[in-house]
Image: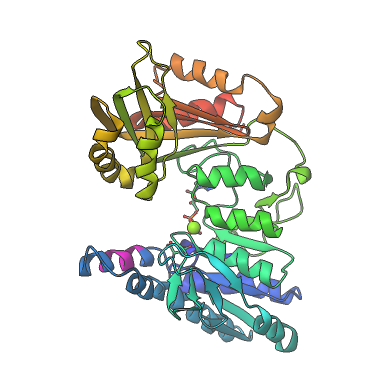
């Protein structure tokens, strides 16, 4: 069972979480719990690091931000003990959860679940584990997994102890066709395929950290997303299970729609290079330096030149890397050879996702027409087997998402 920040935002909510845990224990299950920091805590800790020094040591950043989860794991253990349930807290370094040494974005390399299993079996002791954190074996230093990383902690631990399920409790009762805060007509999905969830998460839906979905897919962990704000005993009358969304293999999907969901990301920036030399090696001269600078390039659009000499090239980068990307290109101007550099940050990438697209033609064409009718200009397009993405002006984000949501029949009736 994993509980996110809003679910553990104060002591009363932690007591509510303890009631969810008690229900599972009373039903005879062996339970490991992963908790996030209280809502807002990690942001505060990050802000303090920046305030202390804009350029700070990533190892010390991790020492600071990992502390949020230490508080909630201890508090939940206390709340459980107060209900008469045997429980203890575990920090990442205590299990241990081994990670790479990429501080602030560390990857989990291995989880030792032996002691957890032993205690679950021998004394029914509930393990309350701090999410988001681990330790690097070589350096012995505390690491963190990147924002939203507790989801990944939970899936990794579930895999290590061969749990039957990994239930992710959050502030919505499942995965919706799009962010329910933006589209009130969004519908909860009973099931979604790992691959679709992977696309949704990586294209902007922050309900699960991307790596947690990847890990669930590879290690075959059944992930069930549900709400901690639903009463502990609530049951969906149609399905006779609690309301929520199961993330599972494609074969387990019951009904197959062409489009499953829509994601959007405002953290994008567009860069256009005008009148680039149209000759072999130019793309390498542009994207090589960007890769060396660790800047992820996403959508790339290049025209076929009309004069046989020069063309325009457009691509997107994370908004946070916009200035750095422009500087990188500008300092490689001599090798690249271009006339002008344009950029835009007020852009959004809207993505339409569904495994059903593999076997249906013309899915994207419908979207182009529908957005055109609303006067929304498309700046760039990318497609893959199970999704397509459109770059538009940020002011049209809500309109575009709602339009596409209705267009593909996703609105709740
Ligand atoms: P937690 O603190 O529990 O980890 P998060 O804030 O990380 O919770 O994730 C839950 C939020 O994800 C929801 O409140 C919702 O606004 C947002 N969200 C974005 N896209 C979706 C979606 N497709 N389905 C459900 N929630 C979504
Ligand atoms: N507390 C961390 C964050 O806010 C990890 C998490 O909540 O998953 O990013
Ligand atoms: Mg989260």
Location of the C terminus (image quadrant):
top right
Residue 389 vs 238, above or below: the answer is: above
Residue 174 falls left or right of residue 348: right
Is residue 34 found inside the magenta-colored segment of the image? no
Residue 73 falls left or right of residue 267: right
Residue 3 appears in the rendering: no
- Of residues 328 and 403, which is closer to you in this image? 328
The residue shown at (70%, 51%) is: 236
Residue 38 vs 355, above or below: the answer is: below
Q: Which coloring applies here?
A: rainbow
Magenta highlight: main SS: helix
- Residue found at the far top of this picture: 307
Residue 340 falls left or right of residue 353: left
- Of residues 310 and 389, which is closer to you in this image? 310
Location of the N terminus (image quadrant):
bottom right
Q: Position of residue 219 (x, y in %)?
A: 69, 60
The residue shown at (45%, 81%) is: 140
Residue 319 appears in the rendering: yes
The residue shown at (51%, 46%) is: 202
Q: Position of residue 289 (x, y in %)?
A: 34, 43
Q: Position of residue 4 (x, y in %)?
A: 50, 63
Q: Position of residue 175 (x, y in %)?
A: 59, 47
- Of residues 403 and 205, which is closer to you in this image? 205
Residue 110 vs 391, above or below: the answer is: below
The residue shown at (59%, 59%) is: 230
Say which quarter of the image contains residue 410. top right
Which stretch did the figure color magenta?
A: 43-48
């Amino acid at each position: 069972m994993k509980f996110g920040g809003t679910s553990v935002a104060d002591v009363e909510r932690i007591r509510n979480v303890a009631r969810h845990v008690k229900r599972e224990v009373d039903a005879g299950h062996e339970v490991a719990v992963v908790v996030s920091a209280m809502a807002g805590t990690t942001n505060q800790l990050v802000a303090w690091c920046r305030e202390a020094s804009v350029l700070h040591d990533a190892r010390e950043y991790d020492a600071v931000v990992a502390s949020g989860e230490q508080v909630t794991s201890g508090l939940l253990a206390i709340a459980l003990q107060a209900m008469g349930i045997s429980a203890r807290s575990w920090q990442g370094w205590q299990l241990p959860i081994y990670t790479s040494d990429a501080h602030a974005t560390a990857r989990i390399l291995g989880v030792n679940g032996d002691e957890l299993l032993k205690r679950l079996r021998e004394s029914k002791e509930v393990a309350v584990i701090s999410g988001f954190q681990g330790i690097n074996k070589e350096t012995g230093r505390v690491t963190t997994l990147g924002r939203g990383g507790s989801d990944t902690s939970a899936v990794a631990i579930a895999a290590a102890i061969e749990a039957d399920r990994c239930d992710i409790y959050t502030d919505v009762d499942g995965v919706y066709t799009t962010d329910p805060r933006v589209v009130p007509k969004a519908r909860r999905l009973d099931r979604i395929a790992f691959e679709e969830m992977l696309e949704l998460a990586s294209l902007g839906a922050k309900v699960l950290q991307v790596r947690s979905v990847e890990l669930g897919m590879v290690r075959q962990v059944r992930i069930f997303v549900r709400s901690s704000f639903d009463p502990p005993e609530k049951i969906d009358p149609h399905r006779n299970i609690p309301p929520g969304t199961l993330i599972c293999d494609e074969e387990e999907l019951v009904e197959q729609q062409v489009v499953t969901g829509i994601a959007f990301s405002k953290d994008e920036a567009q860069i256009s290079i005008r009148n680039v030399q149209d000759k072999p090696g130019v793309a390498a001269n542009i994207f090589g330096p960007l890769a060396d600078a660790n800047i992820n390039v996403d959508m790339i659009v290049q025209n076929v030149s009309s004069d046989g000499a020069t063309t325009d090239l457009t691509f997107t980068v994370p908004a946070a890397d916009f200035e750095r990307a422009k500087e990188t290109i500008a300092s490689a101007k001599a090798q690249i050879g271009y006339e002008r550099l344009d950029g835009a940050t007020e852009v959004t990438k809207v993505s339409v996702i569904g495994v059903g697209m593999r076997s249906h033609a013309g899915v994207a064409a419908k979207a182009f027409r529908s957005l055109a009718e609303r006067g929304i200009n498309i700046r760039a397009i990318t497609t893959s087997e199970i999704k397509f993405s459109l770059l538009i002006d940020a002011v049209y984000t809500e309109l575009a998402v709602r339009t596409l949501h209705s267009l593909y029949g996703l609105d709740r009736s």
